[in-house]
Amino acid sequence: MSIAILFDADIKNGGSYHMSINNLLEIKKKFNRNNLNCVILTHESNSELERLNIDYQIIKITFFDYIFILLRNIILINNVIIRINLISAFEKKLLKKNISLIIFSFVSYKSYLLKKINFTSTVLDVCHRDFPFFKEVRGAVYLIREYLNKNILPLSSLVITDSDFLKKKIINFYNLSPNSIISIPNIPSSLIVNNKKISLRYVKKKYNITKSFFFYPAKFWYHKNHIIILKVIKKLKVRKININCIFCGRDKGNLKFIRNKILEYGISKNVKIFDYLKDKEVLAFYKICKALIMPTYFGPTNMPPVEAWYLDVPVVYSSYLKNHGKNAALYFNPNSVDELIQALKNLDSVEIKKKLILNGRKRLKEIIEERNSGISLFVKKIKNLIK
């Protein structure tokens, strides 16, 4: 019998994509060491997997599979499907490959295609419950997330999440057994860590970087809170203090607002905005920035601080995420311009910067240890499931 990891993450999704890559690499390696046959499945060719020398098989989802998913969500028809033991074309393909369990990188609607094959789900966050007023998680998005979580998580053989803090929330929100949830914390992206060769001089020249800057790699969602950084730059400029910041990330509905505010505040010379950068370029920006600023509301963890700790970059972090950063960051209320200004001022202290870097290394070591324990437990439980 084989275990399958369905890798259907989109590189445009940033942190969740890198989390999926990391989990795939380490879980597959652990399976191999435990003599468990593991195959990687995708719906199309994937250049990143090829670059990492990961073998994979392509398995398509057909039009009839989507109809099957729809029918399974109509109670009366689903009862008939169960009674006559009808299975999807997708599951038939998996059974032919002798697959007994499939690992999903998300809480996936594709789970409805499975009846005979067990599956595990991955919960990235429950921020739609924590911050339901944000545009990106309200309305239909909120309803879909809740529907999937309430219906799919109880059917999952195991649930992966990225922290014990999130695990407790999932137990509370969806009444799941603690034994069914395993925390596997995020580590720096393999795609960034493995990009060793990069010319910092070339990147500076390419992007015309001539001044010191703070770095914020994040898609332009409302909850990413880019606006507070602009307000800080504006307020300091009135005091004749100039600081600079570089943003990079795809537009998710808030970029036009941010660009307009930059013009309104008169800080065009202080802010650079780039679209989604190559991994090696992101690595270079980390290496040459003064610090990472992370004013996001969403969590309970984020990938950039972990990458910054790996690269000895000081972290200035939203106080909402103290459970993640612990003593490896300077914190500020993400609603307070003055608190962020004070945090940035504190970075002028050489001693504080040294302490942050040292604590970042320690925090990363803790995360790696927690991750190793989580993966070992996950593999142990999988072995018991497929006996």
Image: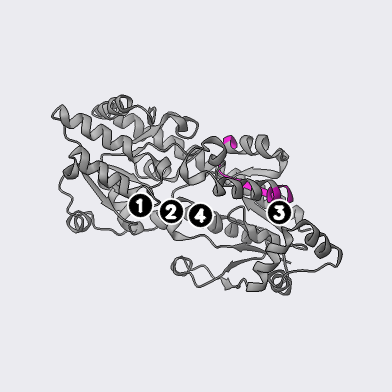
Q: Which residues are the magenta region? A: 151-165
For the residues bearing labels 4 and 1, Cβ distance under 8 angstroms:
no
Front disc: 3 or 1: 1
Q: Is residue 326 above or below residue 101?
A: above
Residue displayed at 20% across by 59% down: 206
Give neighbour class at mark 3: few <14, some 14-19, many 20+ (Cα, 10 Å). Answer: some
Residue 289 visible? The answer is: no
Give residue 22's mark: 4
For the residues bearing labels 1 and 2, Cβ distance under 8 angstroms:
yes
Give residue 249's mark: 1
Residue displayed at 55% across by 54% down: 23
- SS under mark 2: loop
Residue displayed at 46% across by 33% down: 321
For the residues bearing labels 2 and 3, Cβ distance under 8 angstroms:
no
Q: Is residue 337 left or right of residue 142?
A: left
**N-terminal-most mark, 4 or 1:** 4
- SS under mark 3: helix
Amino acid carrying label 4: it is Asn
Distance from the alpha carbon under mark 4 to that under mark 2: 13 Å
Residue farthest along the right direction in this orientation: 83
**N-terminal-most mark, 1 or 2:** 2
- SS under mark 4: helix
Amino acid carrying label 1: it is Gly
Picture coordinates of residue 87, whole percent (x, y): 77, 69
- Magenta span includes 162: yes
Give residue 195's mark: none
Give neighbour class at mark 4: few <14, some 14-19, many 20+ (Cα, 10 Å). Answer: some
Amino acid carrying label 2: it is Gly
